[in-house]
Image (cartoon, rainbow, N blue to C red):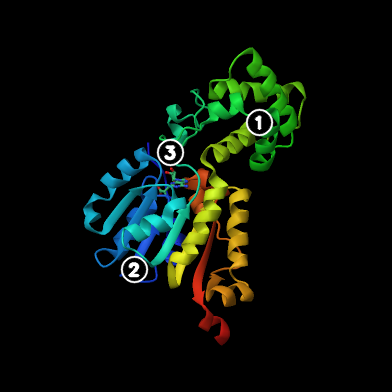
Amino acid sequence: MAFHIPVMLQQVLENLITKRAGIYVDCTVGGGGHSQKIIELIYPEGWLIGFDQDVEALEFARERLKTYQDRVVLVKSNFSDLEIVLKSLGFNEVSGIFFDLGISSHQVDTPSRGFSFSKDNLLDMRMDLSKELDAHYIINHYSEKQLTEIFSKYGEERFSRSLARIIVEERKKNSIKTTSQLALVITNFYARHKKGKWRIHPATKVFQALRIEVNKELSVLQEALLQAIRLLEIKGRVGVISYHSLEDRIVKNTFREWEKKEIIEQYGYGLKKLSKKPIYPLDEELSQNPKARSAKLRFAEKIGIKEVSEK
Ligand SMILES: C[S@@+](CC[C@H](N)C(=O)[O-])C[C@H]1O[C@@H](n2cnc3c(N)ncnc32)[C@H](O)[C@@H]1O
């Protein structure tokens, strides 16, 4: 089984790479699908710096990219440390920065990682296995109020309050240890209350919320985008593939904010979106990789104050 099929590969390469002798950063190396094509296009003039917080992903990618190892640096790190890590490696300015958010197929499909309700295992969901907070702790220790808040904010779950209440009741009887135990509590709730027709599995939103909370996905994204804008050279590009509206909103709003004239005047640089609307996978790609169906790609270019006054 493939580790992960890269999404919108061609569209990413066309928008990200502006010169062969550039320094490019893949903040989410995963199985190395995007990374491999990036380095193929820029080797041996350019550099690829790859981040992932998951050691299993990095091991796989290191093997895949070994032909190019003299021009590839792989770092086990959260991309929230983008700036500090790049500067410590001596890369003060870069030509392109790319994020392919979320988790890889390998992570979802490996039962022991505890991401999926369709594969029974201990609740976990940590991308970085050295971190302490996992989904099991959240489900069994967060207060009803905290659970309601994360289900509603990160899962946009309509029944967040009721689900938090039944989870708290359930865990008083037995601790909720596994992905299927949790999925069953949620499915039973929906079945008992005949809550609409299920277009998606009833546990989808709660599982999304847990994953975001375990990995602090939204706050690290916001933080990393600001660092990316600082690190880019003028005409350098930042691109993000997001898979749900909460992530996409952060990307859209950050790009929009950095296009404002007053921001550009204040900092001396800003962004210009490469396209008004996000880029979506083509039907041909979706027919081969249905997992890409929720993907949205946005790109922006860094501009200096001179370009704004010349507009
Ligand atoms: C969708 S996959 C990337 C797949 C990759 N583009 C490919 O073609 O194989 C996302 C990867 O990013 C990593 N990741 C997600 N958030 C991260 C973060 N904040 N810091 C570092 N890595 C992160 C995950 O561990 C996962 O391996």
Pick whichever of labels 1 and 3 is earlier in the sequence: 3
- Three-letter code, disc 1: Pro
- Three-letter code, disc 3: Asp
What quarter of the picture does the C terminus occupy?
Answer: bottom right
Judged by depth in the image, the label closer to the viewer, 2 or 3, is: 3
Query: Residue under circle 3?
Result: 128
Q: What secondary structure is found at the residue carrying circle 3?
A: loop
- Do callouts 2 and 3 mark residues in contact (Cβ within 8 Å)? no
Q: Quadrant of residue 107?
A: top left
Q: CA distance from mark 2 to mark 3?
A: 29 Å
Q: Is residue 135 above or below residue 5?
A: above
Along the line of sight, the residue nearer the viewer: 300 or 92? 92
Query: Residue under circle 1?
Result: 202
Could you say where residue 154 lies in the image, as x and y percent from the top left? 64, 41
Pick whichever of labels 1 and 2 is earlier in the sequence: 2
Query: Residue under circle 2?
Result: 22
